[in-house]
């Protein structure tokens, strides 16, 4: 699946991605610096009704958010692996615990630790078209 969006249509793009994701719990976001990974994850969190402040976990590695689904409070993790050197550092930071927790995990820079992701991870590729438009493509591995 592939579609284009801009900041004006990011809400609709986030809705499309949640629909396409189905039961996927781990979404791995690939894209160059400035492609809009954090911005898109912010839109995804808004669509889920996250009330917490959504920001880049570049320095903390893992942010945890809460949202309500079917009347129950759920946890969602936002991970940014950019500062990690390898899979060993990811394991030490607790990334694997999040990935296999059963909670939704939205992960930026998954290529820093590719071997620790579940097989059913949904990979989301963001490409810059121009200064205001992005292309989003999704795939399982």
Image (spheres, rainbow, N blue to C red):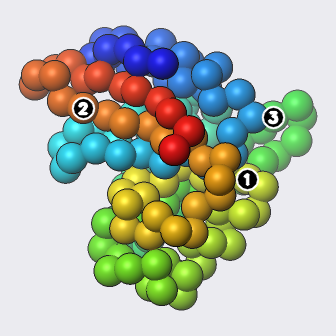
| Residue 21, x across and y down, in percent | 63, 29
Residue 14, placed above or below residue 3? below
The reply, left or right, for residue 109 in relation to residue 17 is left
Of labels 2 and 1, the one closer to you: 2
Q: Nearer the viewer, residue 36 or 116?
A: 116
Residue 2, placed above or below residue 109? above
Q: Nearer the viewer, residue 129 or 54?
A: 129
Which residue is outermost to the right?
71
Residue 57, placed above or below residue 27? below
The residue lying at 18 percent from left, 30 percent from top is: 128
| Residue 129, x across and y down, in percent | 16, 22
The reply, left or right, for residue 69 in relation to residue 18 is right
Which class describes the residues within 10 Å of circle 2: few (<14), some (14-19), or many (20+)? some
The residue at which mark 1 appears reads as 103
Of labels 3 and 1, the one closer to you: 1
Determine which quarter of the picture holds residue 18. Answer: top right
Which class describes the residues within 10 Å of circle 3: few (<14), some (14-19), or many (20+)? few
The residue at which mark 3 appears reads as 69
Q: Which mark is residue 127?
A: 2
Which class describes the residues within 10 Å of circle 1: few (<14), some (14-19), or many (20+)? some
Of labels 3 and 2, the one closer to you: 2
> Which badge, 3 or 2, comes first in the chain's sequence?
3
SS type, badge 1:
loop
């Amino acid at each position: 699946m592939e579609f284009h969006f801009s900041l004006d249509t990011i809400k609709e793009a986030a809705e499309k991605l949640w629909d396409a994701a189905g039961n996927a719990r781990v979404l791995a976001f690939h894209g160059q610096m400035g492609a809009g990974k954090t911005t898109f994850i912010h839109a995804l969190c808004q669509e889920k009704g996250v009330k917490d402040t959504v920001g880049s976990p570049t320095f903390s590695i893992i942010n945890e958010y809460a949202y309500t689904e079917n009347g129950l409070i759920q946890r969602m993790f936002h991970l940014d692996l950019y500062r990690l050197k390898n899979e060993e550092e990811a394991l030490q930071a607790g990334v694997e615990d999040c990935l296999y927790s059963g909670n939704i995990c939205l992960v930026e820079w998954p290529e820093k630790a590719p071997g620790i992701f579940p097989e059913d991870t949904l990979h989301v590729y963001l490409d810059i078209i121009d200064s205001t438009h992005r292309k989003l493509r999704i795939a399982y591995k």
